[in-house]
Image (cartoon, grey):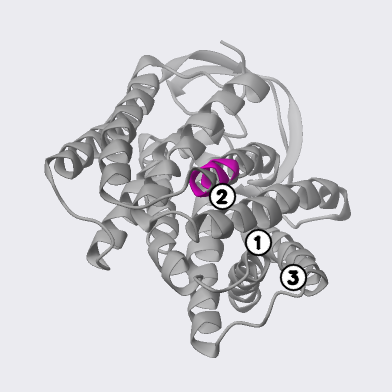
Amino acid sequence: MKRGTISSGVVLAVAAAVAFGSTTPFVHRFGMGVGPLMTACLLYSGAALMGILWRGRPGIEARVGRSHLPRILLVAMAGAVIAPTALAWGLQRADATSASLLLNFEAIATVLLARLFFDEAIGRRIWMAVLLMLVACAILVPASARAATSTPWGLAAVMVATLAWAVDNTLTRPLSDLDPMGIIVRKASFGASFTAGLALAFHEPLPPMTNAAVLLVCGATGYGLSLRLYLLAQRRLGVARTGSVFAVAPFIGAAGAWMLGDGRVNGATVLAGVLFAGAVYLHLSEQHAHEHTHEPIEHDHAHRHDDGHHGHAHEAPVAGVHSHSHHHDQTTHAHDHAPDVHHEHAH
């Protein structure tokens, strides 16, 4: 893996965090008076529309097959039903700044689940980055809670959302090497349909047109575009590192809340910003290189022939990124790498 691949993964994860975090204050403001199930439905309807309209070139990404649908349904239940509904309910009972900052716990839970289920190697720099983000959250949340009105149940609902999205992130890892738009359309469509059915069953009223339009846009950017960027980052960095970098999202959300008048900048905010910047730098500057062995494997995913792992031949020359089923022989070498699809070896 080229060093630039790891750096590009960090940049993609930060971009995903910005896309998601910047929508939280708007969901808080325009979700007021809208049922939580209807809010979740509109958010993921926006994500589904984005996925349908954003068509990629055929042959670039590996196709999503029927065998992937059971996992996609689990991902959708956790990340497109439980999480957004809990977040919408919590945002109606907590101020946007405190809720945005509490979303930091998604990253912590994701790192722990990645270690537990995928045994991803997490070095000292990554643990230090997680610690810096924890400290930043510990500085910001109490200060925000003292300065605003939030109910314990509202904050607890936001915590439930973070745990559900952490489960979503972990379950998504085996899907991240497939066509991201195919994953988004299926996940978002199921989530929107399921929450729409529940909203009708619980007689939640239709929202005003302005609120519905804003929530749809938030869904397209914060839940559709953000997920695409997140999946692309996850295939380069693995579960833990992507989840850790994504912890920038709460700070983005808090900054957005401040710009909308829900919060204020003080010494704690500035210090937290420095800590978040330091955590991102630790990710960008991480080096993990050692001799490792690739076992023989046959799989299908987007790849190019100049990345050091795909030297197979084609009958007709192929350049650039493409996808097809291909075989890897056993190989032993040493280079800088992250726990992507080719580097899931034990340490």
* Along the viewing direction, whichever of 77 and 315 lies nearer the viewer: 77
Percent across and percent down for residue 84 are 60, 57
The quadrant of the picture occupied by the C terminus is: top right
User: What residue sits 67% from the left and 57% below the top?
Assistant: 80
Where disc 3 sits, the SS reads: helix
Q: Which labelled disc corresponds to residue 23?
A: none
Mark 3 or 2: in front is: 3
Give the total of numbered labels.
3
Q: Which residues are magenta?
A: 154-160
Q: Which labelled disc corresponds to residue 231?
A: 2
Q: Residues within 10 Å of mark 3 (few under 14, many from 20)?
A: many
Where disc 2 sits, the SS reads: helix
Asked whether the viewer can see residue 343, the reply is: no
* Along the viewing direction, whichever of 186 and 340 lies nearer the viewer: 186
User: What residue sits 59% from the left and 27% below the top?
Assistant: 114
Q: Quadrant of residue 3?
A: top left
Percent across and percent down for residue 234 are 54, 42
| Residue behind mark 1 | 184
| Residue behind mark 3 | 199
Cα separation between marks 3 and 2: 29 Å
Seen as rendered, the residue at the extreme left is 267
Question: Which tag, 2 or 1, sits closer to the chain's start?
Answer: 1
Percent across and percent down for residue 50 are 58, 74
* Along the viewing direction, whichever of 163 and 33 lies nearer the viewer: 33
Look at the numbered discs 2 and 1 and tell me whether their residues touch, using CB distance below 8 Å.
Answer: yes
Q: Residues within 10 Å of mark 1 (few under 14, many from 20)?
A: many
* Along the viewing direction, whichever of 149 and 172 lies nearer the viewer: 149
Residue type at the position of mark 3 = Ala
Magenta stretch: residue 55 in it? no
Question: Which tag, 3 or 2, sits closer to the chain's start?
Answer: 3
Q: Residues within 10 Å of mark 2 (few under 14, many from 20)?
A: many
